[in-house]
Amino acid sequence: MSTTPRNLQILTLVTALLGLIALGLVFFYAPREAVMGEVQRIFYFHVPSAWVGGLAFFVTLVAGVAFLRTGDTKWDRVGFSSVEIGLTFSIMTLFSGMLWARPIWNSWWTWDPRLTTFTILLLLYFAYLMLRQGIEDPGRRARFAAVYGIVAFVSVPITYFAIQLARSIHPVLFGAANPNAKGDSSLTPAMLRTFFFCLFTFTVLYVTLLWHRLRLANYAEHVEQLKARLINS
């Protein structure tokens, strides 16, 4: 088994450093929000987590298209690995949103349009993992997963635009909301700088995790190939 590539080691250290800086900005640089108070700081982790989830599922879509065009199994590994990471960050999004909602909405959960569509998104990608578990043939599994990953991505833009399309109490950060929406949010320059730095940090974290996860996937496939050779020998 090869050692961790030097570039990956450097990227991991850079990611850790960015994470420490982001924490410092969130808790010591960004001002306290006047209405929501300290709970608003969850926003700096909640939104970047949602962004990484959407990015990861988009990578799965691209990997699915690439696999169907080339038949190269490396794209199947990319898509599968990215879904795992995307689900992890999406779950972080869900629970951080619930922590914010309890003191602000006086409820852990409400069937707001975005929360509803986000729940459907999560179920769709959990089904992706179940689909893979239910198909033993590697080639068939990869083809089905590629097609499913492409189709399932439709849920991502639907979730993002849910606020614009329907009455919602979820805060809107960028773009105009539905005229009947109750949610709103505004950021000071310091808040914006902190937000974009956290967004960048989480993006780098995604790249780092994907690289690590792909290495594990490559090792797993190598082990499966060795097992197949032993069985056929």
Image (cartoon, helix red, strand yellow):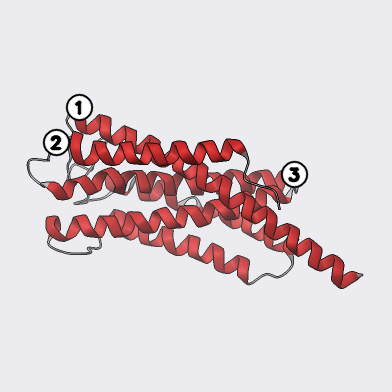
Depth check: give the residue in front, 199 or 216: 216
Dot 1: what SS? helix
- State the residue position of label 2: 31
Nearer-N-terminus badge (3/1): 3
Query: Relative to residue 2, is residue 173 drawn left or right?
Result: left
Which amino acid type is marked by label 1?
Answer: Pro
- Name the mark on residue 189: 1
Neighbour tally class for label 1: few under 14, some 14-19, many 20 plus, Cα within 10 Å = few
Question: Which one is closest to the eye, mark 2 or mark 1?
Answer: 2
Depth check: give the residue in front, 193 or 98: 193
Depth check: give the residue in front, 114 or 224: 224
Dot 3: what SS? helix
Q: Residue 141: name its quadrant.
A: bottom right
Instruction: Identify the residue at horizontal 55%, vertical 53% (top origin).
Output: 151
Instruction: Identify the residue at horizontal 39%, vertical 55% (top origin).
Output: 90
Q: How far apart are marks 3 and 2 (CA)?
A: 50 Å
CB atoms of marks 3 and 2 within 8 Å = no
Query: Relative to residue 146, is residue 21 drawn left or right?
Result: left
Instruction: Identify the residue at horizontal 74%, vertical 47% (top origin).
Output: 72
Give the vertical position of 59 relative to 189 (above or below).
Answer: below
- State the residue position of label 3: 70
Outermost residue, right side: 233
Residue 75 location (% of width, % of height): 66, 48
Which amino acid type is marked by label 3?
Answer: Thr
Give the vertical position of 228 relative to 8 (above or below).
Answer: below
